[in-house]
Amino acid sequence: MRGRAPLYRRTAVALTAVLACAALVTALMWNSVFELAFSSQVTLTPTSRGYKEWVAPSLPLFFNVYVFNWTNADRFPEELPNLEELGPYRFREHRRHINVSFNSQNHSVSYRTQRSWYFDEEFSNGTMQDNITIINVIAASAVYRSRHWGFIQQKGLSMGLAMLGQAFSVTRTAEELFFEGYEDPFLDIAKILPATTTGGAPPVDRFGLFYERNNSMDTEGLVEVATGEASGTYPGQILRWNNYESLPFYEGACSQITGSAGEMMAHNLTEEPFTLFVPDLCRTVHLEFDSSGSLDGVMYNKYTMTDASFDNSVRSPENACFCSGECSWSGTMNVSACRYGSPAFMSLPHFLYGDPELRSYVTGLSPDPEKHSFYFAIEPRLGVPVDVAGRFQFNVFIEPTPNIALYENVPRMMFPVFWVEQKVQVSPELLSELRSVRAVLERGGAILAGVAVALAALALALLTCCSKTSKYTSPQEIKEKDEAEAQSRRVSRLDKISLCP
């Protein structure tokens, strides 16, 4: 028979073999193991790291405002409006999600976003006391809402505008135009008008481009997104907006509420279009793959808005349902349906990718993709945005209105008012962490495979060692050895006896 190896050696061989098998299995399933571990950190649950960063972002946020100062308003409509871009007026933004409520049944979370802005004079090209002239948005809105009124009603509006001294333009300080707002007698009259006349707009005491948005809980409405726990969903995937599962402003495919809510993205992105829901546009937009690149060693896919994003359906028929029955120039988006019927149209800054005719009605615009494009640069495997530039321009649509004296001879045009930029780039510390995480993802499987091979080699070596140290012993040899040991013990006892006196 063979002698048996010591217990500790047999245990070491077995344990090493088990570890080798475990390492090999983990290596073969590394992508799934990593995905499970990573998802546990980014899933929107009260204890996850992703939730803590999502509910109160630590990343510095900045909000830049550029305003088009109308330098020759006193000569309109005889002369083309000359626009002088002022800014940026930079604001530090503090953002947090409030009224957070989890729904365990469909694995979703609903919330509101509270955004607070603080003027950053050091990094602004201008002050809050700058005088700025823009189109009179209040008068333009009143005229636009009256376009389907009868003759007598329009004449009444015309007289009201004249009596209240309404003009094509207004001049106010930047502080008044932005958040503080300014008083206007027309707003007092609007309070007593029926909702059908004002488009259902809530009564206000002042008007400002961002009036009542600072510290408000309703800047983006009530949003419900997936937590990422349910199969087929990802954290931050929008499910409902203001309790709507589809938008009431549009029909068909345009009414769909889909894509990312803008803060968290799907994993494993490809070169397929990236879908994003934008509350300020009241719609879903598709960003096309533009290019791949690297930011401090972190690879990314860049997705941008293109000429098809705001196409008026001439080249993109699927956009026809966004027109709300009235398609305008390509490159502009009619958002009047979700702005209480105001003449609000959005575009990219300086009408980038828009119909050239848009720029023929004004002077001072110079579209530049480097300065004015809207893009998301996202680490595709992990779905983490590393560089974001959200840019939109607000325009007011005007057209000749024969029964209203103030607007009797104006051209049909889009009048640029301002554009905003939300620029975000992750910190060097986060980029370093992303590089480390990506390295673990890419090399973890190979490292574990190497560990499995090393452990297997060690187990084999231990097994070989045990085999070599265990020699063959026949039954006769065992008997002779036992007799010899017994004889040795007897002799030893006799020797001890003989030594006694």
Image (cartoon, rainbow, N blue to C red):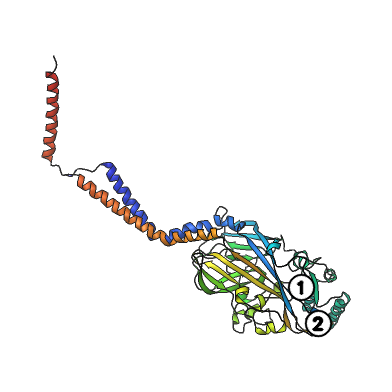
Q: Position of residue 90 (x, y in %)?
A: 68, 65
Residue farthest to the top, as pictured = 501
Discs 1, 2 touching: Cβ within 8 Å: no
Q: Front-most of 229 and 356?
A: 356
Q: Callout 2, which amino acid?
A: Arg
Tag of residue 199: 1
Residue 437 in picture, x, y percent from top left? 48, 59
| Residue 319 in view of the camera | yes
Q: Secondary structure at mark 2?
A: helix
Disc 1 or disc 2, which is closer to the eye? 2
How many residues crowd mark 2 within 10 Å: few (<14), some (14–19), many (20+)? few
- Which quadrant, please, contains the N terminus? top left
Q: Is residue 279 above or below residue 12?
A: below
| Label 1 crowd bin: few (<14), some (14–19), many (20+), radius 10 Å | some
Residue 425 appears left or right of 88: left
Q: Is residue 269 left or right of residue 95?
A: left
Please say if 142 is above or below 495.
Answer: below
**Residue 364 is drawn in which quadrant?**
bottom right
Q: Residue furthest right?
A: 163
| Amino acid type, mark 1 | Gly
Q: Position of residue 221 (x, y in %)?
A: 67, 64
The residue under the point 29% across, 51% down is 458
What distance separates the C-alpha of mark 1 from that of mark 2? Answer: 31 Å
Which residue: 62% across, 66% down? 423
Residue 261 numbered mark, or none: none
* N-terminal-most mark, 1 or 2: 2
Q: Work out which quarter of the rendered image holds the C terminus and state it.
A: top left
How many dots with numbers?
A: 2
Which residue lies under the disc numbered 2?
75
